[in-house]
């Protein structure tokens, strides 16, 4: 496969060149703790840590004894410099309006919002849910929470009222920040009405703050709801950022696992900020004159780490866009890159696949010469898609950083350093300095070159998730049970990523995909069990099994196999199919609606009664079953499922 050394012009000014990277890697392997301690020096600490790393399996703490404030690191330390008048945030609304907030202005707004929250009684340690679209107020709300030490719980605006309710209840949020509606593909998505529905039986929430984005009329609940503009306009722009312990909870972000209930991934302050700051700076080669555009939604971890905390902590200028990439036409991103002179562009393979399908004429109609670096995240990128991104968008000039990481890792873990790493399409290349990743067999021995195995991280890193909120046992089970501490071999316990991978002879890691029941649909992480539980909640459904099949644009698409209760044998299948899709949209969100629903007489099961999803996966991927079926209870089931295709 063709490889791409960093372009000479890029290397000439790059932050980290090849020899420097080699040195950093060696330091990182010798002592990951010392490596990260050195990077921590670049943050503003109110009090220096006394112990960099403390481990009590499965828990870890970083920079213990140190105090800091994340918002102060992202704002105040820039406001005391020339960056006070530098653009922090260039925002573009879907209808076309543009707002620019300098570091000075963003700082003032965050201080105001911090005062508003305090005035409403939100205290350090409280949880605040944020259910918003892509507006600057979402960033302001997040940083205001961080500033007062409230833990934010951002819920993706594409999730349904039911999904929001579940996340508000699980986190015990005391306040919700939302907006009346968001613009999306020329339409409006009603967020406040979803909040009203979600909160109907929730006791913990005392206040809802509503940012007015549209002209729609919005009912407000007396005593609970306040308008953002009403409370913000009278609030002071003066606010002193308190010192918070390094391990103070910064945010909870729910993500899917292999059971029906989403996990509240908890991240804390110091370690998270150290690693997001270092990776934003060095994986994106971020500098003061860059215009950095990350297309992720604020509701996902990429939005947290690489729209908000990483870039702002570095004093970067970020571009944030509200709407759909094909609104009003399929060239919206290219048009924005041209108009804002974007230099760094970070997006997902699923988006690139869609751009490719829409056609070269769209990017070709725009001047993309301002670009100097491209990035991808979220799923494996097919080499031909990588090549298109490189040639058509990057004009064969821009290095591509394929970044592997997870909600749980908090920050980038495996990625090229653009001025130093020779890239190969389809691999995120090698672990960053200070990250001890390996591909191992189930027994813990390292795989040989090109042998498929499990991706593990052998030493905890600063931005590792600290726990599953309120469920330590699930944390231990999900990430530490595969490779627990082992006295005999002296192993401390390794973090299991849930990903299968192989490492080639050059040391590059190729992600094969998840080995659990987590799927990636259009860059959205979903648990098949969540979708199954939405389906079986329908009165006509007896059992459901959801699997993924490859999809040209989405990466993966969901296929649901369902069996009917005997009482439902006479229902109209077409109506039921629609009802089931609606049920999933109501329970989780539109993103989780299966592409296909197949009705079956029975599902393939082992003798002990477990549904054999592996066989169903094979059926929807290859169209046939060749794998081991010796534990299968009733083989005729497979035949009937195959014949179900024409349904
Ligand atoms: O399977 C890996 C895939 O996305 C999973 C993490 O999903 P999530 O927590 O939603 O975070 C996505 C954004 C950080 C991983 O377990 N994944 C992420 N990045 C890549 C990737 N697979 C291949 N290549 C990547 N660059």
Image (cartoon, rainbow, N blue to C red):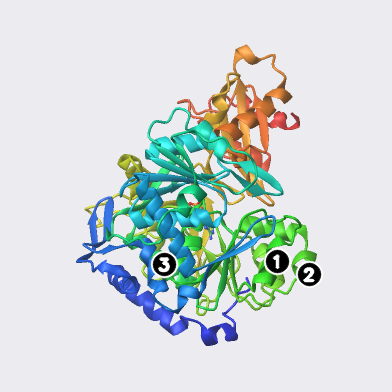
When the figure is inspected, residue 1 is found, relative to residue 17, above or below; the finding is: above
Tell me where residue 350 sits by quadrant.
bottom right
Locate residue 51 relative to residue 225 in the image: left or right. Answer: left
Q: Which residue is mark 3?
A: 75
Discs 2, 1 touching: Cβ within 8 Å: yes
Q: Nearer the viewer, residue 286 or 636?
A: 286
Tell me where residue 343 sits by quadrant.
bottom right
Q: Residue 514's spot in the image, x, y percent?
A: 51, 49
Locate residue 146 relative to residue 427 in the image: left or right. Answer: left
Could you classify mark 2 by the number of other residues whose Cα lies within 10 Å: few (under 14), some (14-19), or many (20 or more)? few
Q: CA distance from mark 2 to mark 3?
A: 37 Å
Q: Which residue is mark 2?
A: 365
The mark that comes first in sequence, 2 or 1, is 1
Q: Residue 175's spot in the image, x, y percent?
A: 41, 42
Q: Which residue lies at the image location 53% right of the left edge and 76% below the top edge?
A: 418
Mark 1 residue CB less than 8 A from any atom of ligand 1: no
Q: Which residue is mark 1?
A: 334
Q: CA distance from mark 2 to mark 1?
A: 8 Å
Could you classify mark 1 by the number of other residues whose Cα lies within 10 Å: few (under 14), some (14-19), or many (20 or more)? many
Q: Which residue lies at the image location 39% right of the left edge and 40% below the top edge?
A: 173
């Amino acid at each position: 496969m063709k490889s791409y050394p960093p372009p000479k012009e890029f290397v000439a000014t790059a932050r980290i060149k090849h020899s420097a990277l080699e040195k950093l890697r060696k330091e990182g392997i010798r002592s990951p703790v010392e490596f990260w301690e050195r990077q921590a020096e670049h943050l503003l600490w109110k009090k220096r840590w006394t112990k960099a790393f403390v481990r009590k399996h499965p828990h870890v703490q970083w920079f213990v004894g140190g105090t800091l404030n994340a918002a102060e690191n992202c704002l105040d330390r820039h406001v005391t410099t020339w960056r006070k008048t530098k653009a922090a945030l260039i925002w573009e609304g879907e209808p076309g309006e543009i707002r620019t907030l300098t570091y000075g202005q963003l700082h003032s707004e965050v201080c105001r919002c911090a005062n508003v929250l305090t005035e409403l009684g939100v205290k350090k340690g409280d949880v605040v849910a944020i259910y918003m679209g892509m507006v600057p107020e979402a960033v302001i709300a997040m940083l205001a929470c961080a500033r007062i030490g409230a833990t934010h719980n951002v819920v993706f605006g594409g999730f349904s009222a039911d999904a929001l309710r579940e996340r508000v209840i699980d986190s015990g949020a005391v306040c919700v920040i939302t907006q009346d509606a968001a613009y999306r593909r020329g339409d409006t998505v009603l967020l406040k009405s979803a909040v009203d529905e979600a909160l109907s039986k929730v006791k913990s929430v005392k206040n809802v703050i509503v940012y007015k984005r549209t002209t729609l009329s919005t009912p407000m609940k007396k005593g609970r709801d306040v308008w953002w503009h009403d409370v913000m306009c009278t609030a002071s722009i003066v606010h002193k950022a308190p010192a918070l312990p390094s391990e103070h909870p910064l945010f909870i972000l729910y993500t899917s696992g292999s059971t029906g209930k989403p996990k509240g991934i908890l991240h804390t302050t110091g370690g998270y900020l150290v690693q997001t700051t270092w990776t934003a700076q060095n994986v994106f080669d971020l500098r003061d004159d860059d215009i950095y555009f990350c297309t992720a939604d604020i509701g996902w971890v990429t939005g947290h780490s690489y729209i908000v905390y990483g870039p702002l902590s570095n004093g970067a200028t970020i571009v944030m866009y509200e709407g759909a990439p094909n609104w009003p036409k399929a060239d919206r991103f290219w048009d924005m890159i041209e108009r804002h002179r974007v230099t760094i562009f970070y997006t997902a393979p699923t988006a690139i696949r869609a751009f490719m399908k829409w056609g070269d004429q769209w990017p070709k109609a725009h001047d993309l010469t301002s670009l100097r670096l491209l990035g991808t995240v979220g799923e494996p990128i097919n080499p031909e898609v990588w090549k298109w991104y490189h040639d058509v968008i990057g004009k064969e000039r821009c290095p591509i950083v394929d970044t592997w990481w997870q909600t749980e890792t908090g920050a980038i873990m495996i990625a090229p350093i653009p001025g130093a790493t020779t890239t190969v399409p389809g691999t995120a290349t090698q672990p960053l300095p200070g990250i001890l990743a390996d591909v191992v067999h189930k027994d813990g021995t390292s795989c040989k070159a090109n042998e498929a195995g499990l991706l593990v991280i052998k030493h905890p890193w600063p931005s590792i998730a600290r726990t599953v909120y309120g469920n330590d046992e699930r944390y231990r089970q999900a990430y530490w049970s595969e490779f627990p501490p082992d006295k005999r071999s002296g192993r401390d316990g390794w973090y299991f990523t849930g990903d299968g991978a192989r490492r080639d002879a050059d040391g590059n890691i190729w992600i094969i995909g998840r080995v659990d029941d987590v799927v990636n649909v259009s860059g959205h992480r979903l648990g098949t069990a969540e979708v199954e539980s939405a389906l079986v909640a329908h009165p006509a459904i007896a059992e459901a099994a959801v699997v993924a099949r490859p999809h040209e644009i989405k990466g993966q698409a969901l296929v649901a196999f369902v069996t009917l209760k005997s009482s439902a044998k006479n229902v109209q299948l077409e109506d039921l199919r629609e009802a089931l899709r609606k049920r999933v949209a109501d329970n989780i969100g539109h993103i989780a609606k299966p592409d296909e629903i197949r009705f079956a007489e029975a599902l393939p099961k082992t003798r002990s009664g477990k549904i054999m999803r592996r066989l169903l996966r094979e059926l929807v991927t290859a169209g046939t079953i060749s794998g081991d079926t010796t534990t299968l209870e009733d083989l005729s089931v497979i035949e009937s499922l195959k014949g179900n295709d024409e349904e």
